[in-house]
Image (cartoon, grey):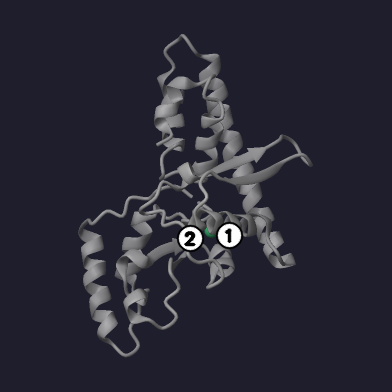
Amino acid sequence: MVKIERTNGENAKIAIASLEKEKQKKNGNYNASEIFDAINEIFHGKCYLCEQRGFYQVEHLIPHKGNKDLEFEWNNLFLACPHCNNIKRDKYTPILDCCKVDVDQKIAFRKHGYWGTEEYLEFTALSGDAETKMTVKLLEEIHHGSTPQKQAEAKILYVKIVKSMRTFKNYVLEYEAAKGQTKLDTLELIKLELKSTSEFTAFKRWLIRDAKEKYPELQQYCQ
Ligand SMILES: [Zn+2]
């Protein structure tokens, strides 16, 4: 999870107007195509919880439970994958709002180990507030699963994280090997991978943050 800028561009304005209209209807739809398209654009096609890209659904940060104000509130609509949406439901609330908070400054996202059994993902709360603690619990269930089906889905997600991190680490190694020479291409790739538009950005940023002494010059791209 990383901070996502909820921009108010043209598509967002159209979506907000549509939400107002849908709210007045008896069976209004917060998932109308213009609303979905605007949300999909803002979240870069990524699930805001696990940061994998795919074909997703609009979900409510604060469960609406039939409350129309919450159901059709633009700032309460997020893009989530079925795996995360299904785990979150009404069980995990309140959690951090990634459109307002730098989540990866409040939680450390770490992938430990290499090649096999000693590998694991770790989520560390860096602040003691209730939302941060609840978000850590949610992330743990998303990434470890609590039922056989959810464990199988978490395993598939894990493989995607490992692959993405491997590519990212290779860029960093290439950058390291070329230090002192002008190797701008790799640096540009690293910068792209550390942006909120990339998949699994929080893990990549923490890889660089944990190597602060080795890569002081890369810290500025972890914002
Ligand atoms: Zn997800």
In the depicted view, which residue is nearer to us: 86 or 211? 211
How far across and how far down the image is residue 1, in percent?
A: 49, 50
Q: Is residue 185 above or below residue 201?
A: above
The vertical placement of 116 against 138, above or below, is above
Residue 124 at x, y percent in the picture: 59, 45
Q: How many marks?
A: 2
Q: Position of residue 127 (x, y in %)?
A: 51, 46
What amino acid is at disc 1? Leu
Q: Which amino acid, mark 2?
A: Ile
Circles 2 and 1: CB atoms closer than 8 Å: yes
Label 2 within 8 A of ligand 1 by Cβ: no
Q: Give the secondary structure at mark 1.
A: helix
For residue 95, the mark is 2
The image shows residue 49 at horizontal and vertical percentages of 51, 56
- Quadrant of residue 222 in the image? top left
How far apart, in angstroms, are the residues tagged by discs 2 and 1? Answer: 8 Å
Residue sitting at the far top = 180
